[in-house]
Image (spheres, rainbow, N blue to C red):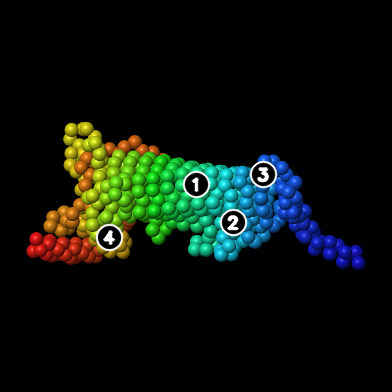
Amino acid sequence: MRLVAIAILFCLLPWCAMASESGPDDSRPMAEIVAMIAAAEPGATLRIPAGTYVGNLLIDKPITLDGGGAAIFDGQGRGNVIEVRAEGVTIRRCTIRASGEDVTGEPAGICALAGSVTIEGNTIEDALFGIDLRESPDSVVRGNTITCKDLEPGRRGDGIRLWWSHGCVIEDNTVRGSRDMVFWYSENLRISRNTVTDCRYGLHFMYSHDTVLEENDLWGNSVGVYLMYSNRITLIGNRMRGNRGASGYGIGLKDCDDITLRDNAILANRVGLYIDNSPSSIGAFGRIESNMIAFNEVGLLATPNTHDIVVVQNAFIENEEPAATHGRGQLLKNHFAENGAGNYWSDYAGFDLDGDGIGDLAYEPRSLFGAMLGREPNLRLFVHSPTQRAIEFTARALPEFRPEPTLIDPSPLAAPPRVDLALAPAAGRSVAMGGVAASLLGLAVACGLMFGREQRMARRQSGAQA
């Protein structure tokens, strides 16, 4: 019997060790917090004891909920974990987790349905939507860390969403693995120093006006910033890097008026800056000034109807294509110089004989391969290959094949303006093609000749019509 008892004890030892490591269950009913709120006077600060509070919480009076960094609110996969229905509520230093997952109800870690709410210093995890402000003006969302549910990108909710919430401040937040950080019908916002990674759109604006975006860091998303139907937006000192999804824009503008981009670093995206019909109204403007646009597949991509954009004092450095049109056409209706100064283009082949810092020849990119690429995007396979070099050699050897310039910068800068290259990725951009070089050379010449023949026929037809 003694041997049997020893054997049983030996078998139970691992289970005892596991129990001691896990510690006692610190779960507490949410009813404790509900009772604290019911007993509190408006404006009171409730310091929540450490522990995990299970269930859903409704806050219906102006109080401050301070978790002290040790209070956890666990929704157990049902609805909004915390719902705010009173003005003047503050939620700080709490961990909020496990909202519902049913997308029809759009459950969130924190959902605010009233204005002037402050949400700061919280950790939100395993939530479909992180923080959702609905008609919640003059609110502050500051210093929160938000991780959404681990779902396929198409099923995720937004890390931070504003709907009809004017005058809000969104700053110093970190958002990972959500759909978007999105702003609907919300004006006079200040969006500062947020970090957004592994999302669809880092910052997404829909019909939201009069807003400043500054010093945000948006990397590893499908798109960095996308502004749609939003006017009077200023972007200053933001960093968009490595956004390489299906569209892969560092910054995208669609039907936007009075947009200013200044001192931004737009690095290693599929497309650095995409412009579609912006500005879209008579008398509106767009200004792109003193930005570093570097190491992108395409530095600037715009639809041919883009007009009256001022693009000056920017550094276009080592982009595979400095500038291109989305479809056929040119960008000649825009202004690439102002007061005798244009932009720096790393592929500029001119010179500055008088040493005034301005190239003596205009920058007029005429890439035969780029024109072919605009018609057939799959040719990007041959970027930096002997095929591309052979096509460009064909265009130089036979000038009649050269297309019209994509743009004209009459005063290109001889040296890059003062920009911070600390965030620039490694400069190695070439693609080795090795043993296929010889066969691709013949393909390149054939493609160039075919493209040139199309151009000659088009010119003859246009001359006959004239």
Residue at the (39%, 45%) spot, across then down:
232
Q: Which residue is mark 4?
A: 327
Residue 108 is marked as 2
x, y percentage for residue 283? 29, 46
Q: Nearer the viewer, residue 213 or 199?
A: 213
x, y percentage for residue 331? 25, 51
Among numbered discs 3 and 4, the one appearing first in the sequence: 3
Q: Are marks 3 and 4 in contact (CB under 8 Å)?
A: no
Query: Which quadrant of the figure has residue 367?
Result: bottom left
Q: Amino acid at mark 1?
A: His
Relative height, residue 128 to residue 120 (above, below) = below
Among numbered discs 1 and 3, the one appearing first in the sequence: 3
Q: Are marks 2 and 1 in contact (CB under 8 Å)?
A: no
Among numbered discs 2 and 3, the one appearing first in the sequence: 3
Q: Amino acid at mark 4?
A: Gly
Among numbered discs 4 and 2, the one appearing first in the sequence: 2
Cα separation between marks 1 and 3? 22 Å
| Disc number lying in front (1 or 4) | 1
Question: The C terminus appears in which quarter of the rendering?
Answer: bottom left
Q: Amino acid at mark 3?
A: Ile
Relative height, residue 415 to residue 440 (above, below) = above
Q: Which residue is mark 1?
A: 166
| Disc number lying in front (3 or 4) | 3
Residue at the (29%, 56%) spot, across then down:
303
| Disc number lying in front (2 or 3) | 3
Q: Secondary structure at mark 4?
A: loop
Q: Are marks 1 and 3 in contact (CB under 8 Å)?
A: no
Cα separation between marks 2 and 1? 20 Å
Among numbered discs 1 and 4, the one appearing first in the sequence: 1
Q: Which residue is mark 3?
A: 63
Give left or right: position of 344 versus 245.
left
Cα separation between marks 1 and 4? 37 Å
